[in-house]
Amino acid sequence: MNPTTSVMLGPDLMGELRAFINGATRSSRKGHLDIGLARVALSLLKTLPASREAVLEYFCFLFDEVVRHYIENVEVAAQKGSKDHEVTLSAQEEAAIAEVHNVLCDFVSNSPEAWAPIISKWSLQLLGELSSRYASRAAHSGILSESLQLWMSCRATRSLIDITTQCLSCLMNYDTESCINALLDTCVAHSPHFDWVVAHVGSCFPRTVMTRVLSCGLKDFCSNQQGPKAPKLNSVVQILGYLAGSHSTDMRRALLQLFQWSLEKSKVSDAVTTHQQYSTVPFLLQLASMSSTLLRSLSMDVLHTLTPKILSQLAEQSADWLAYYGGREAFQDLLVHLVLGCPSGGPTILALLLDCASPSTPKLMPTTPEEIVVQTNGQEFLELLLQELSLLLHRVDGNIPFLSSLRQDLKTVLPLLLSPLRLRVQSALRLIGFMGLQSPSVFPNAIAYILTNAKTEDHLSVVAKLLENQASASGNFRKSNRTGLSLEHSNILQLGLEQALHKKDDGLSIRDLWKNLTTLLRWERSGKLKNHSQPVLKAIYSSIGTACSSLGSSVKPDVAHAVAETLVLALVQEPGEKPTSVTPPIIQDALRLAHSTVSYFFMCVEIDDSRGFEGCQVACKLLSRLSLRSSAARSLALRTLLELALFHGPTHLFGANDLLNEEFFSAEESDIRLMDENLKQGLSWVLAQRHSSVFHAGVIGTGLRTLNKKNTTPISLVQRNTQLFLDAVRSCCVSNAILDPTAMEPGMPTLSLDTVISVSLLLVELISPDVMYNGLPWPDEDGCKATVERDCYIRRKLEQGPILWELLWFIGLQRPALCYCSVILRAVTATLIAQWGSCSHHRDPSLLPTTVRLLSLLALGQLLPSPLSSLRDVVPHIKPPEVVQVLRDCVWNYMRDHVPAPDLFSRDTHGNMWRDSTQEPPGPQYTETMRLIMLANIDSLGELFAQLFNH
């Protein structure tokens, strides 16, 4: 029903009106909620439009009562220590709220144009009053998410929110502005308690709310030339800032659409619209100055649409902008601070300024008055920006977002150093000088770029200018750098030369790179660099990252060996050498060097001569020194070593037994017939509905699949390579307590238990294909049904790669690191139990070595106490069913009941980890099976039985 429709008052309607007036007065005075009175109010709202304000006022009382009861219950729950906001309403409250909600929603649905603006304004105002009234009593920290949870748990406020969103949904296409205006007005009056309403409504209609809020904010910004003092501006910023955090794409699109609309030229001249278009840019800049989130959104899509031509078009509007900021200087200051605060888009801003101030080609030179104005202002603004950067670097110790953005995308700034235009070169030099004060690595990057790409002597002269700027800047500012790199004049050139050599990957040979270094030495001797400390020689001597590519991927082993020897001399030094001769690698260089050293190690392993053996020893020294200096390099080296040795490298050199299909297999040569293959099955019993009753179909094209062993590496070479590999792993596990390089030479270094534990965890990560059931506990035997496939996979990996057993043995020597390989041990145990169980009374010769190796490993790691640790000596003398019993009753049950936890080990006086099993010997439930089986085989196990069970 239309709220403005007039009707005649009948007797029934008059009676309802009197009842409502009396009841509403009495209810408001007594604080009593009457469901009958609520229904009378709804009836009047339907039949008597003149009572609308009174009825809505009564509904305010009704909702207030429900919210008050809800808050009281929440307070009681908070006093009891409960955070549950779910409060059950009484039947009358629930019925009253539900009926009011349904009727108002019906009004909005049936007549949105008439009711939606009225209902939305009423509901928003009521939500604001309720939020402000009970904000001090609501037990929450003020966080927006907690406010949402608190108020959305209330039936009354949830109904009001639903009514509001329905109003906005109905007015989506033709009159959303009235709802948005009401939203902004309420936000201004009740902020910050009203923020949760804005958050919920905005999340329901992000694009619509963003667009309308921007439109309303722009109109308010333009009205009476208030600009930054507009009353709704703070609310607009709060709403848009919140929505931009969760709907950044929609916010960027809305800002871009508004900006593009400001550039449109309407066919019909409208003073109001034109004024709003001319005020759009100041409005957007003001929003960005009040919210870093909006600044980030604005610096993405809108920034990338700006070109000198667009700026020339905006120059026509610029006369109206100054009125909002009080003058040209204030407006320039705002722009400068916005640019400096941009966390992204720095290269785009710089490119735009340079395109305006100094066009790169003659075709882009300004011709029109507007373009000339843009060029002049661009030059002036660029100078102001650089001056402000210089002042900030004097006062601010933290990072400047604009410089950080440029530093993250430095490759877009470096080409300016080689530009033929003087302004671009000077601007780039100043910016690199500023960035170098925050990150000294910028200077070597710039020098490396110039040395790599310079084509003329003018280009090379930029190196001298850059070094002069760096020296003067470091002398003026005297700031401590954050990377630990020295700001010495010569050291910067060392790092630059190092990077130039490293980046020279365009097909030139190593000999050509050294020719380039020779050219640099010629520059140094001529005095053009004006430095007498021989930085090029220092770079060749002490640079580590320069030789990484040659170390890891050189096709000439002699070059790789030479680089490795140089790196050993650079890293493992005598204490008396000069500090400038050694440059400790930063984390990036350390990681790169670790990876290159591992690659060099495997290259040397493939060389079966004394030179390869010496190269492996050199690689071990490098890995040891890198591991001592950087835990990240240690982790990377260990991971790369294991991955290459087990999966992606020359696994055959370590005895890997990969079975592959033979290529070019001829069916004629094999002379395999399906009839013969199926007749072979007749030698066994044929059981119905069993696999034995299924005929073999063969392999299409080649007959039966045959598998050939690919690995033909001699056993002696496999043993040699395995020992070298374990030496490399051991070098990575060297303890940090050994910091003197001379102490590493004589004998075996002390290993770090934490590092060996990381090796065991890494081994589990690489071998186990599943992330579940990888813990230390051993489950019941039935629990292995869920991990059959995983256990078989792990067992197959151990069979294919014998080096895994050597790694496990290495881990077992460093107790209690073997505990973390529990998943591997129980997988092998589970598969052995199953395989021994299928052997019946015929011993499988391939199972015994694996079983003995497993039991020996468990004994080595002290996971099995005495006498269970002697099972390795018992298994070779007993039958397969007895092996199954021993593995199940003695090993599996003990490990199941005694989790292999590292906490069970303690350090003795010699620094070794040890588990004292005498304090808690295994019970008879674990040893009785072993004892009985040994008694049954007393003829072969008598002596061992006497040693173990003599008591």
Image: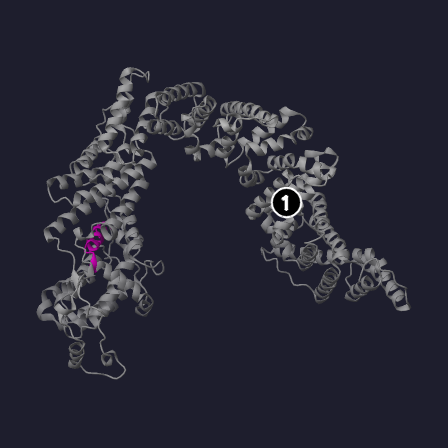
Q: Residue at x 64, y 52 (%)?
A: 201
Query: In this view of the protein, can residue 382 be seen by the observer?
Result: yes
Q: Depth check: 716 or 681 in front?
A: 681
In the rendered image of this protein, does residue 565 appear above or below residue 777?
above
Task: Magenta stretch: give its range.
Answer: 799-815
In the rendered image of this protein, does residue 68 appear above or below residue 593?
below
Q: Position of residue 776 (x, y in %)?
A: 32, 58
Q: Position of residue 626 (x, y in %)?
A: 27, 37
Q: Quadrant of residue 322?
A: top right
Q: Depth check: 159 or 109 in front?
A: 109
Q: Residue furthest bottom?
A: 688
Q: Quadrant of residue 271?
A: top right
Horizontal side of 730 relative to 438 (left or right) equals: left
In the rendered image of this protein, does residue 894 appear above or below residue 296?
below
Horizontal side of 780 relative to 801 (left or right) equals: right
Horizontal side of 497 relative to 211 (left or right) equals: left
Few, some or many C-alpha atoms within 10 Å of disc 1 (few <14, some 14-19, many ≥20)? many
Q: How many marks?
A: 1
Residue 808 magenta-highlighted: yes
Which quadrant would the C terminus be assigned to in this image?
bottom left
Q: Quadrant of residue 665?
A: bottom left
Q: Residue at x 58, y 55 (%)?
A: 81
Q: Position of residue 840 (x, y in %)?
A: 18, 75
Residue type at numbered disc 1 = Ile
Residue named by callout 1: 239
The secondary structure that dominates the magenta segment is: helix
Which quadrant would the N terminus be assigned to in this image?
bottom right
